[in-house]
Amino acid sequence: MKKVSGSMKLELAQYREMAAFAQFGSDLDASTQQLLNRGSKLTELLKQKQYSPMTVAEQVISVFCGVKVIWMILI
């Protein structure tokens, strides 16, 4: 799982920081907007239904697809 997640923790930290900053400013450049979009999608990817957790294999596959941006192509 650690190998697969790679930079996801850093990306989510950057997303949270930018999301807090974006609340105060409306003029966002393209790279900031892209970071916010990717961060919100990664956050949604990590959500699980209550009382119905994903198996470890499902988690690894989801995180791998999220990190490698495979799922963005499918959306």
Image: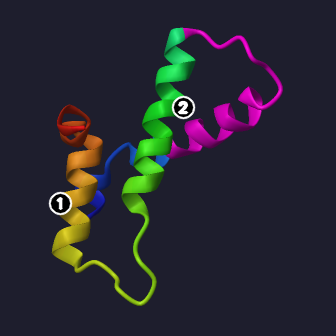
- Around disc 1, counting alpha carbons within 10 Å, would you say few (fewer than 14), some (14 to 19), or many (20 or more)? some
- State the quadrant of the C terminus: top left
- Quarter of the image where one finds residue 71: top left
Q: Residue furthest bottom?
A: 51
Secondary structure at badge 2 equals helix
Q: Amino acid at mark 1?
A: Ile
The picture places residue 67, in percent across and down from the top left corner, at 28, 43
The picture places residue 29, in percent across and down from the top left corner, at 59, 9
Q: Residue furthest right?
A: 24
The residue that disc 2 covers is 36
Are dots 2 and 1 in contact, CB under 8 Å? Answer: no
User: Taking 49 as reference, is 14 left or right?
Assistant: right
The residue that disc 1 covers is 61
Residue span colored magenta: 12-29
- Quarter of the image where one finds residue 61: bottom left
Q: Does residue 14 show up magenta in the picture? A: yes
Secondary structure at badge 1 equals helix
Image label count: 2
